[in-house]
Amino acid sequence: MKMTPELQMAQENMLPGKISGQGFLGDDHRPLIDIITEDEERLAKSGKSFDELFQRMEYFMIHGRKGLGEPIVVDNEWEVWVDEARGKMVCPFQDGIYAKINARVCKISTKDCITYSELALHLIHKHHFFQGNPSSYRLNPEELVRILF
């Protein structure tokens, strides 16, 4: 696939200092379409779809909010914390503004944890973007599946 004007604009918005100080790509200098395509393939190999992953991530975000900033046990298998910070983040694809809400989900049996934001949830669901490698906020598709399912 080739880079569309939308993807080119989004990739420029992902550079450090445009929307966030660190940016969304880390040291990954590949075209955005290549980053997305590789992660689509990685998620497909995990046996889960983007809709399944989104629904699971959203499930934990919704249930975790019931803890009002304190940890809450979900389905007797995961400990979830959801917290909010002041401010908002703009999607680099320019299709929304998201509150700074973070969910931390830990699988109790393995003690493995993953943290993701409301913006990350949107980026994965709508744009199939897990962030560049090694971005500080990068989410690994296989790790998400292993911990959340």
Image (cartoon, helix red, strand yellow):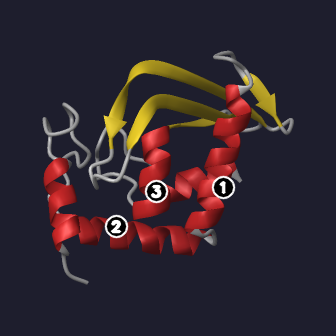
Residue type at mark 1? Answer: Gln
Q: Earlier in the sequence, mark 1 or mark 2?
A: 2
Q: Quadrant of residue 83?
A: top right
Marks 1 and 3, how far apart in space?
Answer: 11 Å
Report the disc number at residue 130. none
What residue is at 36 percent from the left and 71 percent from the top? 38
Q: Can you say whether 135 is above or below 38 in the image?
A: above
Q: Secondary structure at mark 3?
A: helix
Residue 98 as seen in the image, left or right of residue 70 = left
Q: Could you tell me the amino acid type at mark 2?
A: Ile
Helix, strand, or loop for circle 2? Answer: helix
Amino acid of disc 3: Ile
Helix, strand or loop status at disc 1: helix
Q: Is residue 101 left or right of residue 54?
A: left
Vertical comparison of 109 with 92: above or below = above
Residue 64 versus residue 130: which sits nearer the camera? 64
Report, in whole angstroms, how far the alpha carbon at label 1 lies from the one at label 2.
19 Å
Q: Which residue is mark 2?
A: 36
Q: Is residue 20 visible?
A: yes
Q: Nearer the viewer, residue 129 or 96?
A: 96
Sequence-wise, the earlier of marks 1 and 3 is 1
Mark 2 vs 3: CB contact within 8 A: no
Q: Which residue is mark 1?
A: 55
Q: Where, quadrant-wise, is the N terminus in this rendering?
A: bottom left
Residue placed most toward the observer, 8 or 106 = 8
Number of the front mark, 1 or 2: 1
Q: Which residue is mark 3?
A: 124
